[in-house]
Amino acid sequence: MLVLALGGFAIGTTEFVAMGLLPEIASGLDITEPIAGHAISAYALGVVVGAPLIGSLAARVPRKTLLIALMATFTIGNAATVLAPGYGVVMVSRFVAGFPHGAYFGLAALVAAHLAGHGQRGKAVGLVWMGLPVANVVGVPVASWLGQNVGWRSAFALVAVLGLVTIGAIWSGVPSLTRMPVTNPLTELGALRRTQVWMTLITGMVSFGGLFAVYTYISTTLTDVSGLPLSLVPLALMVFGFGMITGNLIGGLLADRALMPGLFATITAFAVALGVFVVASHNSYTALVLLFCVSAAGTSIVPGLQTRLMDVAADAQTLAASLNHSALNIANAFGAWIGGVVIAAGYGYTSPAAVGAMLAMAGLVVLAAAVAMERRSVRSAR
């Protein structure tokens, strides 16, 4: 589990560090900061495109071999960013680095669940996803410091080294997985014909958007609304990261003990935390407390969604598991966009949390509809 989480740590570091190094990237490439932001979009596009393609086309590849191949592609993409002579190559390299992102997390979750056994699947998935929040607490600050003081390319060089270490760790630390079944592209594509797979993905896309509606604008929210000194914003981001760690643990335990009640509970808690944050954000102390709650509740949804996909995807689990991360990345992009829309409309920096609460409640509606459809299908089969 730790080896698989190490890959998540490397991926999480490269995904988020670019956001904090945009001024340095822009200066180094002699472009504007908004154009440098295209590097983030290129990475996200790689995630969304790569997950379904790899999840279906690589269905026959042995699982351990595929894990190594995915991390090798990730490492090559980050190394290419380090060596890129200009803007165009940087965009291509960020796309390549993001391409294996979703497939890696999906496959790593399946491998972890396979090794842990049925009663421990949620906990195993939570441990694999732990690499992302730990990256926010440790990897991103270290890489950002390195990029600001040594040069922005050094941050991606660090990530490339992490990729190489992960490849070695998977090679030596993950068993052969010969008992883990492989499928074929047609079988995997069968996931797209299953209504419950789509309903689970839509639940994630709708409800999870609120997390990044808040996170994207958290720095200005804390300084302008909460009155937090700018120098303490990194501390707030660490609080957010610790919330993600807590949420992964809670979500994994709930997924094992009561999957569907746990999903309803975590999404409800997320909606409540976002709603309370609208009021709590006007004080720096309560803002930090609720920021932790928002992060923990939002992240706790993910292990349940991943486990639910394992249950409803039947023999097409690789594609379904990979699509989960594509769905969450779409939620990230949509949440950031809708948060910017309401701020631009003049509703203030607390409005993204309010919109996020409504998105979470909409996710509850989708999940309830999915359960009703599933029960109706079971009754019809009888």
Image: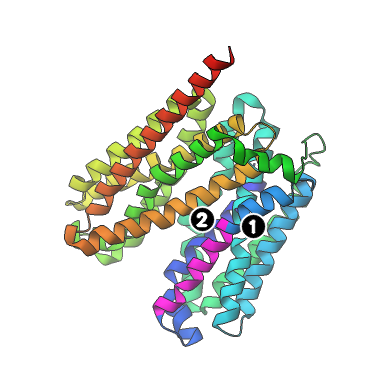
Mark 2 neighbour class, 10 Å CA radius: few under 14, some 14 to 19, many 20 or more: many
Which residue lies under the disc numbered 2?
135
Q: Is residue 2 visible?
A: no
Of badges 1 and 2, nearer the viewer stands 1
Specify the label residue 36 is tagged with: none
Q: Which residues are magenta?
A: 33-48
Report the amino acid beneath label 2.
Ala
Q: Earlier in the sequence, mark 1 or mark 2?
A: 1
Observer-nearest of 222 and 368: 368
- Residue drawn at (50%, 85%), measured in percent from left and top? 29
Whether residue 35 is in magenta: the answer is yes
Quarter of the image for residue 337 reads bottom left
Separation of residues labelled 1 and 2 (CA atoms): 18 Å
- Along the horizontal axis of the image, is 269 left or right of 57? left
Whether residue 286 is in magenta: the answer is no
Which residue lies under the disc numbered 1?
100
Mark 1 neighbour class, 10 Å CA radius: few under 14, some 14 to 19, many 20 or more: many
